[in-house]
Image (tube, grey):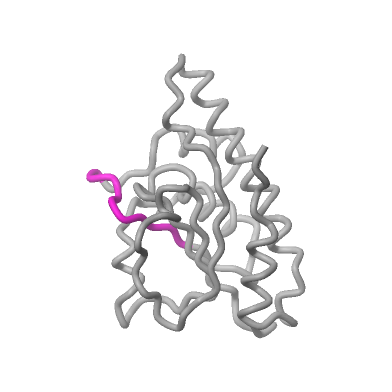
Amino acid sequence: MTAHQPIHVLFLCSHNAARSQMAEAILNHMGGSRFRAWSAGREPRPDGQPHPLALEALHSAGIDTAGLRSKSWDEFVVAEAPPLDLVITLCDQAAGEACPVWPGQPATAHWSYEDPSLVQAPHEEQLYAFKHVLHALHQRLELLMSLPLSRLDKFMLEHHARELAPRAR
């Protein structure tokens, strides 16, 4: 990792609708010139839109959502794709899937978060679930950003990213 190039991070969830979209927006919001984030999934939402409650949670936190769209992970295996330094799966389903071979063999990690879109409750309780995941992602991404990235090679980045995974309760 160099001090002058941003760390390129791809967040994966099967449907690229909520958790991965929130992680992308949070890291791009907080990461400044040090990070550049994207998100994708195996089966992106057919309408290409992030989950409405993910957008609402991000807006309530003051995080820009312009440009967010649900996209296929196939966009990141083509020659024109941005070079990736780190790929993080955020759902257990995506972690268990056969992911594509990423160009450049980036570091990988799995951070398991429950899917807030599965909460069947009134709107306020659903929104709370999204805000809870947003807050947890924010905390984890702050830890990632605190790493001495300019002194980490790919293997150490992978080690530290995996160490940041939420622990089972």
User: Is residue 169 left or right of 121 when viewed as pictured?
Assistant: right
| Number of numbered callouts drawn | 0
Whether 2 is drawn above or below 138: the answer is below
- Residue 39 located within the stretch drawn in magenta: yes
Whether 104 is drawn above or below 144: the answer is below
Question: Which of the two residues, 162 or 20, is positioned nearer the viewer here?
Answer: 162
- Residue 115 located within the stretch drawn in magenta: no
Determine which quarter of the picture holds residue 161: bottom right
Q: What residue is rendered at 61% in x and 80% in y?
A: 154
Q: Where is residue 75 in the image (x, y as percent from the top left)?
A: 31, 68
Q: What residue is rendered at 46% in x and 16% in y?
A: 121
Question: Which of the two residues, 160 or 134, is positioned nearer the viewer here?
Answer: 160
User: Is residue 148 left or right of 59 when viewed as pictured?
Assistant: right
Q: Where is residue 94 in the image (x, y as percent from the top left)?
A: 41, 53
Q: Where is residue 150 in the image (x, y as percent from the top left)?
A: 72, 81
Question: Which of the two residues, 107 or 46, is positioned nearer the viewer here?
Answer: 107
Q: Which residue lies furthest to the top in this view?
A: 122
User: Is residue 151 left or right of 108 when viewed as pictured?
Assistant: right
Magenta segment, principal secondary structure?
Answer: loop
Q: Quarter of the image containing the C terminus?
A: top right
Determine which quarter of the picture holds residue 99: bottom left
Q: Quarter of the image containing the N terminus?
A: bottom right
Question: Which of the two residues, 63 or 123, is positioned nearer the viewer here?
Answer: 123
- The magenta-colored residue range is 38-47
Q: What residue is rendered at 46% in x and 62% in y?
A: 38
